[in-house]
Amino acid sequence: MKFSAGREVVHAAADGFSWLVAVANKGIAFALPDWLAPTTGSPNFVTSALLPILLVVPLFDILTYIGLLPWLVKWIGRGLSFITHQPRFEAFFSVEMMFLGNTEVLAVSKDQLQQMSAKRNFTLAMMSMSCVTSAIIGSYIKMVPGQYVLTAIPLNILGSIAIAAILNPVTVPADEDIVVSINKNKDQKREPFFSFLGDSILNAGKLILIITATVIAYVSLAALINQLFSLTGLSWLTLENIFGIILFPFAWLLGFDVNQAFQIAQYMGTKLVTNEFVVMGEITKNIMAQKGLFANEHARVVLTVFLTSFANFGTLGMIIGAFKGLVSKEKTNYISSRVPQMLLAGVLVSLLSAASAGLFAW
């Protein structure tokens, strides 16, 4: 937060990916012009998070086809692997997901995911809980302080690497730490470009349908649970409040008094059950005006950083849906059986990032 150079680098990279999404929007506007105008006060989920996949995936597949992406993964991944002590692809993946978003970064990694073990795939699933997409960073900074949003993004990446290594330690032998290319066998005839591109676009379209169906089901199930709770007549009994109570000790440990910690924990719980936009919309007036709870810079920093990620129930559906469309049933089942660990990883990374940022603002 104190170093503008780091924020400028993150901002510049985010602007680059935002430009790519803006290009994708031209195609979306041609086919579905009405979908580009949000009517609920927040971006259209399908338009902002999913439909750009139809450009992003073929673009990255083309880069793979010509050999550029595997080359970048090999050499950039080698440098990052030396720093983080992670396998080369996981190290490169951590930077990709900083801007591409969880579904896009998984989609462009299809060939690599299919060659990796189920356990390594699960590592990527946990890391994907803590990313954002550059397409909506602009929406974030309209509702909460932008400097804290840009601070949260690299903190989440570092945190996701650390938490994944703790919850799912993986040792990758040198002969398995490889980067997959389109033609692993030099004697194999390369698929014609336009046939390859057509398959890429078709697979991207299928992936969007799978993710959309899965996230609708997950969010609806959470809403159904709340409706069932309401039958008890206890107005306070909701998933948001339950998670708020669970997170209260952690909020208190972040440096708040009891009353402040309870308010912060309620916002955290709401974010997990719904999404970050719901909470940002609720707090935007006070946090931008630095009023009430947010007169304290520590509260502004901690909550903004905690909110700046996709860690919630809906994201679980998106990630599981993405893997269903990308890897074998056995690998998907391995990941699906560990959904609680994925949610735990997302929460722990958000708390770790919030605590780290909060140390520098009191």
Image (cartoon, rainbow, N blue to C red):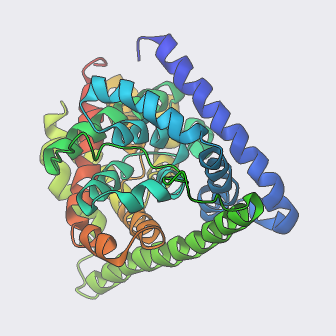
The image position of residue 181, as x and y in percent, is 51, 49
The answer to whether 27 is drawn above or below residue 252 in the figure is below
Q: Is residue 154 left or right of residue 357?
A: right
On the question of residue 144 being in view, the answer is no
Q: Hey, which quadrant is residue 11 in on the image? A: top right
Q: Which quadrant would the N terminus be assigned to in this image?
A: top left
The image position of residue 70, as x and y in percent, is 51, 41
Using the image as rendered, state which of residue 72 and residue 178 is in the foreground: 178
Name which residue lies at 59% across and 57% down. Answer: 49
Name which residue lies at 46% across and 53% down. Answer: 102
The image position of residue 308, as x and y in percent, is 43, 42
Name which residue lies at 67% across and 62% down. Answer: 191
On the question of residue 256 being in view, the answer is yes
The answer to whether 355 is drawn above or below residue 22 in the figure is above
Using the image as rendered, state which of residue 356 and residue 86 is in the foreground: 86
The image position of residue 253, as x and y in percent, is 13, 36
The single residue placed furthest to the front in the displayed view is: 187
Total numbered circles: 0
The answer to whether 265 is drawn above or below residue 203 in the figure is above
Q: Which quadrant would the C terminus be assigned to in this image?
A: top left
The single residue placed furthest to the right in the displayed view is: 30
Q: Hey, which quadrant is residue 202 in on the image? A: bottom right
